[in-house]
Amino acid sequence: MTTSALVGYARTSTTDQKAGLEAQLRDLELAGCTKVFREEISSVATNRPQLAAVLEWVREGDTLVVTKLDRLARSVADLVSITAALKAKGAGLRILAMNLDTATPTGKLMLNLLGSIAEFERELMLERQREGIAKAKADGKYAGRQPTARAKATDVLRMRAEGMSVSDMVAALGISRASIFRILADHETAPSS
């Protein structure tokens, strides 16, 4: 017979947030987590290896513990996906800052409501951002992000003329292969490979 475990997951967006990560680790230990997965990666990253590892590791009866909802999920869809993966394995979810536990009906309801509110807030923030950018553009105060790869077009064309390979250009200029091919195509000297 296996015993259930409290499994922690701690995440910070950058390596500069050491204090935040340490606080999460401390809180997870105090909550009784016997195993903790941790990573320093943005929540918007498509690949969060330690989150995937913890979802693979949990077993039936285990509970995944996080300090805050935003340390775990980036959207309602993401939250639904994570909770579905946990449910399929027979595992629960506990969020310490909210005193929320999906082992209870109230916890399940609250999790769905909070996830919806978080997504709504994000959509409002993005809408305000778009409006601000539109106003700044109308006022002539917004130029947008400057294209970094196209600024290196002269270097790409010169290196190509010198016979340098695309891989060597990527390494030398720090831009993607796709950007190099786009620049070459724009100047109709695209390589065949």
Image (tube, grey):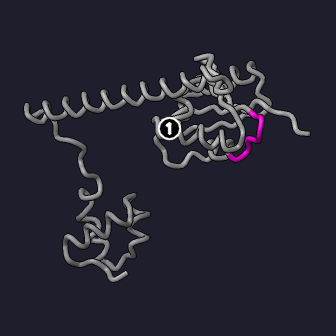
- Give percent across and percent down for residue 34: 80, 30
Q: Quadrant of residue 29?
A: top right
Report the side of 110 relative to 3 (left or right): left
Q: Residue at x 40, y 31 (%)?
A: 119
Q: Is residue 42 visible?
A: no
For this view, does 143 lie left or right of residue 169?
left
Q: Is residue 83 above or below residue 174?
A: above
Q: Closer to the camera, 181 or 160?
A: 181
Secondary structure beneath label 1: loop
- Magenta segment includes 108: no
Outermost residue on the right side: it is 1
Q: Who's the residue at 53% across and 36% down the image?
A: 79
Residue in the picture at 49% in, 48% down: 46
Q: Which residue is mark 1?
A: 43
**Where's the C terminus, which quadrant?**
bottom left
Magenta stretch, main secondary structure, is: loop
Magenta residue check for 61: yes
| Residue 24 locus on image (x, y percent) | 64, 24
Magenta segment, which residues? 56-62
Q: Establish if 90 lies above or below 121.
A: below
Q: Amino acid at mark 1?
A: Ser
Q: Residue at x 36, y 25 (%)?
A: 121
